[in-house]
Image (cartoon, rainbow, N blue to C red):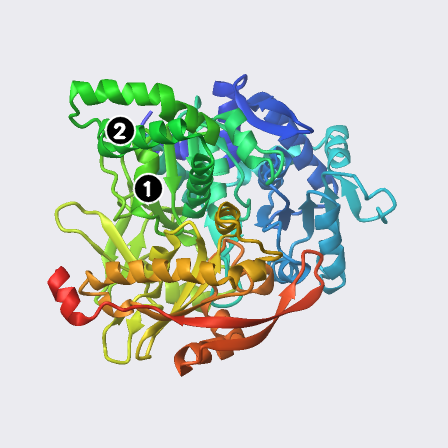
Amino acid sequence: MTSQALSGALDTFPKLLARNVREFGARPAYREKEYGIWQGWNWTEVAAEIDALAKGLIALGLDRGDHVAVIGRNRPHLYWAMIATQKAGGIPVPLYQDSVAEEMAYVLDHCGARFVVAEDQEQVDKVLEVQSRLPGLQRIIYLDPRGLRKYDHSHLHRYSDVQEMGRAHALDAEMDLRSGALTADDTCVMLYTSGTTGRPKGVVLSHDNIIRTARASAGVDGLNAADSVLAYLPMAWVGDFIFSVGQAYCTGFCVCCPESADTMQADLREIGPTFFFAPPRFFEGLLTNVTIRMEDAARFKQALYRHFMRLARRVGPRILDRKPVSAVDRLHYRLGEALVYGPLKNALGLSRVRVGYTAGEAIGPELFDFFRSLGINLKQLYGQTEASVFITQQADGDVRVDTVGTPTPGVEIRIAENGEVFYRSPGVFREYYKNPESTASTKDAEGWVATGDAGFIEEGTGHLRIIDRAKDVGKLADGRLFAPKYVENKLKFYPNILEAVVFGAGREMCCAFLNIDLTAVGNWAERNNIAYASYQELAAHPRVYEMFQRHVEEVNESLARDEMLSGCQVHRFLILHKQLDADDGELTRTQKVRRRIIEEKYAELIAALYGGASSIYTETEVTYEDGRKGSIKATLEIRDARVVPADTRRAAA
């Protein structure tokens, strides 16, 4: 069957589900760990669960075109709720489970959700808190009944009861009618952007957008029904939707859901997925834990680890890319696999990973090379919600740390005169919901989408290199280029630095806020007999400042060798007394820095950095997990960092 014929026959997710039942009926489709036990469902069982819920939604009054919000952690039943909504003629709208009630209220009101499918009491309570402001909301369906027995159930329904209602009603014909009426151009899902610069926007993606992108991207890596993925990233994030729904339904592979965020690492080891995605921060955390464990290991183990890791860094990536390696080195590497690499991959849960991806932020060269040297096929991709994720990806044998790869099949890329990256593809979103102005400013009449990122395409290789967010790229007061994200990523390559925010646009020099990584710095403090009672106390410790000053100055030396970005060296910095947090509005739910809000919230700290002060007293409002507000008071030290002068730069060059 040709790809065009396949596209015509299987152009919606209900059709793909039916195909999977026919071709992969007895194969595992979903696994979930609950109460310490892995449970599984094959494609035939999944289809029965979805049909029961779809008919139950129709019985409760769901109309065609209605939006259904889905809120909770990664669970098979919530994935099924999205496909059931489609089969009932509705449109699923997943929300971030860690959103506070106010954030949920905006999305629920904006999309006009009539139904909510919530995981548990916590999510139900957040919806009920704002229900009075949502006149269109009519039904709340909950999965976990614990704590909800005494609630008013006039408009509150248990998930399993809705399924029983669907099984009891003769609604097969109506469900089939609605499902059969779906076309490739109909809305598949609506996903809200992270809102780094304002209110989140509802990105409308069609079945055609998701399915064609999923097929093309899966084809690059040869994904098939024998593969499996661990679904642990937010269901409201487009990446999870393309991996755990798009590619899963297109290829028939198994989606595995961990028991909780706290057990994710252990569950990863148990399930051993063959396909895995994680942001750079996750891989940084793994390497930090490995480093900590090796520092506490016996001397013999340390020596063994260092010996074989030197070999791995030299020949591991070449073996992975099937490049020539001497027979002696191959034999030596196999010994390392038995003694070091294999046990280490097993401890990390990455033993069976055939394809691994990272994206969202730049990943450090040493970090990237570390995992590839172990034989883990880690690659980079570049994408956006508006693209159904994939814009570029890296094919086997063509993997580099300094680029994000070449265009995914079907994607076109061009670079504007100002350096901004534009693309168009089958995955390009239809529109921003109820926002024609933003739609028009992002996507032109020919389908080209502005990414907001600055970059360039390498001659000869066709690889795309991303420099920074186009809106963040500016100039210093003396006209030199200012690219904050580039510098921030260099700073975050150090395991001790969790987050960095660099300032300098229109100013005479660059300054920075830094966050400590409590795990890494706390372990360092323990090994060095440094006592501390709180995050705030550890962040302010003089020896932590000395360590961070070394990191900043090493980054400055690196920047000094880059003629284009040498002006971005950090002259002054401070270590924040609190971790930047999405609940405080400082980060998005996908952990991206909300630069404008930080500049407004910490204006006095920025003024002190540029005013020459050696310290600054501050009081900062914080939001606790239960929603209560509080404040943190601190006197922050401000330090100068050594900057490499121009004549030294020329000598180094």
> Which of these two is toward me, 235 or 387?
235
- The structure residue drawn at horizontal position 55% and vertical position 31%, both measured from the top left corner, is 266
Q: Are marks 2 and 1 in contact (CB under 8 Å)?
A: no
> What residue is pinned by disc 1?
368
| Quadrant of the image occupied by residue 582 | bottom right
Name above or below for residue 301 compared with residue 639: above
- Give the side of residue 307 with respect to residue 40, left or right: left
Name above or below for residue 224 compared with residue 647: above
Q: Would you call the spot at circle 2 few (<14 residues within 10 Å), some (14-19), or many (20 or more)?
A: some
| Quadrant of the image occupied by residue 309 | top left
- Give the side of residue 407 with respect to residue 132, left or right: left
Q: Is residue 35 visible?
A: yes
For the residue marked with disc 2, what is the amino acid?
Leu
Q: Would you call the spot at circle 1 few (<14 residues within 10 Å), some (14-19), or many (20 or more)?
A: many
> Which of these two is toward me, 627 or 85?
627
Structural distance between the alpha carbons of marks 2 and 1: 13 Å
> Which of these two is toward me, 103 or 413?
103
Pointer 2 or 1: first along the chain: 2
For the residue marked with disc 1, what is the amino acid?
Phe
Name above or below for residue 321 compared with residue 60: above
Residue 605 on image: x %, y %: 49, 76
Secondary structure of the residue carrying tag 2 is: helix
Residue 278 on image: x %, y %: 44, 41
> What residue is pinned by disc 2?
320
| Quadrant of the image occupied by residue 291 | top left
Name the quadrant of the N terminus.
top left
Residue 416 on image: x %, y %: 23, 63
> Which of these two is toward me, 456 or 645?
645
Residue 648 on image: x %, y %: 16, 66
Name the quadrant of the C terminus.
bottom left
